């Protein structure tokens, strides 16, 4: 392993450990990182320091002439000059070259052989190497021997800060993406999720250039056959939980592409939230967090090494990364046919969106661009009532093109392949958060079962007067008094007032995108 050279990448360290196995990376972590431990279930527990989540405000995209007109510049893609990027790259290389040990992980992004890219990760922490061993698609021995020059390289020097005086920096953290050189430089954050999302951001640029729609979604497939469904949703809406469906096969939990052939997973692993995880509620995810997996920022019993999944002392954003083939229902290779159903998940803490609605293609484009969910009171300092969150395409921080481009591509595929589109509220019913109650998971699962079985294609619907949605009035396995939200509220006037408030928030948010969509899409929102 030590004979391998990274000279072409500017790395001159002699002790380079390339494509170490999980067992070897465990040994490296235990020997050389004092805070790394092995959990009672066998997962490697590792810690990312002061940053326990992504730093979206510190993401930068290099402004280059060849891609400048294609990038959606603004708060998501903050432009960075080529010279500051070179400075940050040099700073990262200087740091990596001072390390006694460097870890190189090679893998693929994308299960479709025509569209997959070769990714190389160069890092100073074995935990980061193991994380990406889990999250990338793992090459076999022959593919590693023939790996050659990567299509994308990540320089993870996250333990070393950016220089705040460098032009374009606003903090000691910087995650820089160079689309032309296909490089990522990470400074000032050791949160492993930055690497995963850097790959996704690059794919969000590269795939649409090839006529392929990249999507922030989970996907499942039929037990027999190639039919599939995709589920979009922001954090807390149930995207990962609902994709771990024992009645279906898991294609992937987070990042996919839709081609002329069908869909494929970008990743080789899953990165699931671990807070309040129990084997009873999510047995497949719980059991996957064994030897080879990474548990990030969790608390544990010092004597038994038993993880306390309910402890949020370090962060509420505790995570587990594991290979997708540790999930018994995984469909490997992670490819499937065209989706028959496209599902938008929202956790509506206002309690006014119906549990299940059917959308037209124009409504689908509107709600895809909106990407709505709501935070509940108490989740953040200062949040005392439900707070609407809108993230375009249900993945705003990772978009590179304008959201309208992804939305049009989705709408085209929905129409071309006759997919049904559904809006599913996994949030509150009978009142807003604090008054109503959270829709039970078993009812949401029953709705998805009915969707997958095709039982709702001719179901009776009622048009929502505020949002213009075709609300499914009856669904097998779900109480009839749950399906129409206004009927579930004791105070009907309060419902009307809250619904009008949320509708207004939708309209205000959509103003930023209205000029880039058709009249039909603009008219497909709340009335």
Image (spheres, helix red, strand yellow):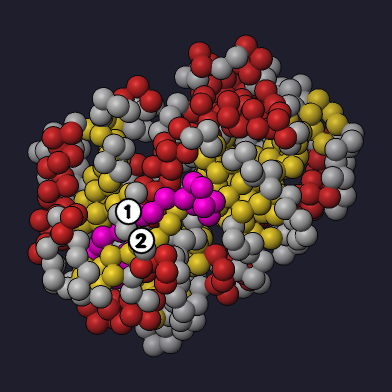
Considering depth in this image, is 258 or 271 the residue closer to the camera?
258
For the magenta stretch, what is the residue range?
110-129
Q: Is residue 409 magenta?
A: no
SS at circle 2: loop
Q: Position of residue 435 (x, y in %)?
A: 66, 43
Does residue 178 lie above or below 94 as drawn?
A: above
In which image quadrant can residue 64 be found?
Answer: top left
SS at circle 1: loop
Residue lying at 28% horizontally and 47% vertically, measured from the top left: 184
Q: Which residue is mark 1?
A: 150
Does residue 158 lie above or below 85 as drawn?
A: below
Asked if residue 57 can be seen in this view, the reply is no
Residue 242 - label: none
Q: Report the side of 329 relative to 94 (left or right).
A: right
Residue lying at 24% horizontally and 82% vertically, measured from the top left: 31
Local crowd at mark 1 within 10 Å, few (<14), some, or many (≥20)? some
Local crowd at mark 2 within 10 Å, few (<14), some, or many (≥20)? some
Considering depth in this image, is 250 or 426 the residue closer to the camera?
250
Pointers 1 and 2 in contact (CB under 8 A)?
yes
Residue lying at 19% horizontally and 31% vertically, measured from the top left: 81
Q: Which residue is mark 2?
A: 147
Q: Position of residue 324 (x, y in %)?
A: 55, 65
């Amino acid at each position: 392993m030590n004979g391998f050279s990274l000279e072409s990448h500017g790395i001159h360290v002699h002790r380079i450990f390339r494509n170490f196995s999980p067992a070897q990376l465990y040994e490296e972590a235990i020997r050389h990182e004092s805070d790394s431990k092995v959990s009672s279930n066998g997962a490697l527990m590792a810690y990312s320091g002061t940053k326990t989540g992504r730093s979206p405000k510190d993401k930068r995209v290099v402004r280059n002439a060849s891609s400048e007109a294609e990038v959606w510049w603004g708060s998501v893609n903050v432009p960075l000059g080529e010279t500051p990027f070179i400075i940050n790259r040099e700073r990262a290389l200087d740091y990596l070259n001072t390390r006694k040990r460097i870890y190189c992980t090679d893998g693929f992004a994308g299960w479709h052989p025509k569209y997959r890219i070769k990714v190389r990760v160069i890092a100073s922490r074995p935990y980061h190497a193991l994380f990406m061993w889990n999250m990338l698609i793992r090459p076999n021995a022959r593919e590693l021997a023939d790996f050659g020059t990567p299509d994308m390289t990540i320089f993870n020097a996250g333990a070393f800060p950016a220089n705040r005086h460098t032009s374009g920096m606003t903090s000691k953290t910087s995650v820089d993406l160079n689309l032309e050189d296909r490089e990522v430089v990470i400074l000032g954050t050791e949160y492993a999720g930055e690497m995963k999302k850097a790959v996704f951001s690059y794919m969000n640029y590269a795939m649409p250039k090839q006529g392929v729609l990249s999507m922030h979604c989970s996907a499942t497939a039929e037990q027999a056959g190639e039919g599939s469904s995709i589920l979009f949703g922001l954090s807390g809406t149930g995207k990962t939980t609902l994709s771990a469906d024992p009645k279906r096969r898991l294609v992937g939990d987070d990042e996919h592409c839709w081609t002329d052939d069908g869909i494929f997973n970008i990743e080789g692993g899953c990165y699931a939230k671990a807070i309040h995880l129990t084997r009873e509620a999510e047995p497949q995810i719980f059991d996957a967090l064994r030897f080879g997996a990474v548990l990030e920022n969790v608390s544990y019993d010092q004597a038994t090494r038993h993880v306390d999944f309910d402890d949020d002392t370090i962060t509420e954003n505790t995570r587990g990364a594991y290979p997708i083939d540790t999930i018994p229902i995984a469909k490997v290779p992670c490819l499937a046919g065209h989706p028959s159903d496209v599902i938008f998940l929202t956790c509506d803490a206002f309690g006014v969106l119906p549990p299940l609605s059917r959308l037209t293609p124009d409504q689908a484009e509107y709600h895809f661009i909106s990407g709505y969910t709501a935070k509940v009171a108490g989740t953040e300092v200062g949040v005392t009532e439900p707070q609407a969150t809108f993230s375009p395409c249900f993945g705003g921080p990772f978009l590179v093109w304008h959201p309208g481009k992804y939305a049009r591509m989705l709408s085209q595929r929905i129409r071309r392949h006759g997919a049904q589109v559904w809006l599913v509220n996994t949030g509150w019913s009978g009142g807003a958060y604090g008054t109503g109650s959270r829709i039970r998971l078993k009812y949401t699962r029953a709705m998805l079962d009915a969707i997958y079985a095709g039982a709702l294609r001719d179901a009776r619907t009622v048009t929502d007067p505020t949002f213009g949605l075709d609300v499914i009035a009856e669904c097998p396995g779900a109480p009839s008094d749950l399906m129409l939200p206004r009927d579930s509220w004791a105070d009907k006037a309060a419902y009307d007032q809250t619904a009008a408030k949320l509708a207004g928030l939708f309209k205000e948010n959509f103003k930023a995108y209205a000029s880039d969509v058709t009249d039909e899409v603009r008219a497909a929102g709340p009335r």
